[in-house]
Image: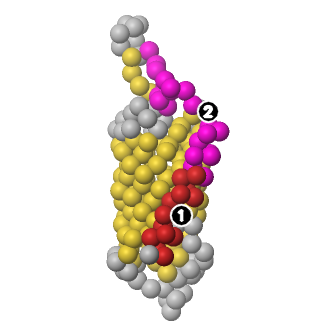
Amino acid sequence: MKLINLIINSLYKTLFIVFIILSFYPTTAQDSGFVLKDSTQDSNKIELNKEKNIIFLELAGNGLAFSINYERFISKVLSLRIGIGTAGMILKCYPFLINYNFENAPIELGLGIVPYSHGYWHNVPETVTSLKYLLTSTIGFKRINKNFMFKATFNPYFSTENKRFTFYAGLSIGIAF
């Protein structure tokens, strides 16, 4: 029962922080993050132009404590993400996710895997253990405005080692190009 209360309290705190951040973020009802560009002289032919690459820093989230990530859009709505993260000097992780980004709303859903290893960064053989995996997901708010990206996410993990779920949240800022 204490664990459930702790999870619920963590979710409320995370949602409250995300709500506060989003309430100060300028939005309009018609802005979907896409720029309309006239591709020809014919006014009936309009194409959507969107940044295809994002480099961002993430605090908590899929990269555990801190991570640097690269995301590439492979279609209008699908993107692949890879990164390198850490939780102190003894844990390295490599988040890899596929994300679905809604076209008309700043919402992102994703699934992925996070290989991680214990051991120091200099990889002394006596301190390194085998590679382990976390199954992860992303449910969040992602906004790209004038090449600046902001993201607030909820990230449930499933540990293949402990066979337990862990609930996490993250904040990201980056540059889209």
| The quadrant where residue 96 appears | bottom left
| The quadrant where residue 72 appears | top left
Circle number at residue 38? none
> Which residue is at the front of the view, 15 or 160?
15
| Residue ID at (53%, 76%) | 91
x and y, in percent, of residue 68 in the image: 55, 58
- Distance from the alpha carbon under mark 1 to that under mark 2: 26 Å
> Which residue is at the front of the view, 13 or 153?
13
Furthest-top residue in this view: 42
Circle 2: residue type: Pro
Can see residue 7?
Answer: yes
Circle 1: residue type: Ser
| Residue ID at (38%, 38%) | 102
Furthest-bottom residue in this view: 126
> Which residue is at the front of the view, 66 or 165?
165
Residue 73, above or below 2:
above
Number of numbered discs: 2
| The quadrant where residue 159 appears | bottom left
| Residue ID at (53%, 57%) | 12
x and y, in percent, of residue 20 in the image: 62, 46
Which of the image's four quarters has the N terminus? bottom left
Which secondary structure lies at badge 1? helix
The nearer-to-camera label among 1 and 2 is: 1
Circle number at residue 26? 2
x and y, in percent, of residue 142 in the image: 50, 43
Magenta segment: 17-38
Can see residue 83?
Answer: no
In the picture of the structure, the residue carrying the numbered disc 1 is 10
| Residue ID at (42%, 45%) | 108
Residue 120, above or below 109:
below
Considering only order in the chain, which callout, 2 or 1, is on the residue closer to the N terminus?
1
User: Is residue 66 one of those drawn in magenta?
Assistant: no
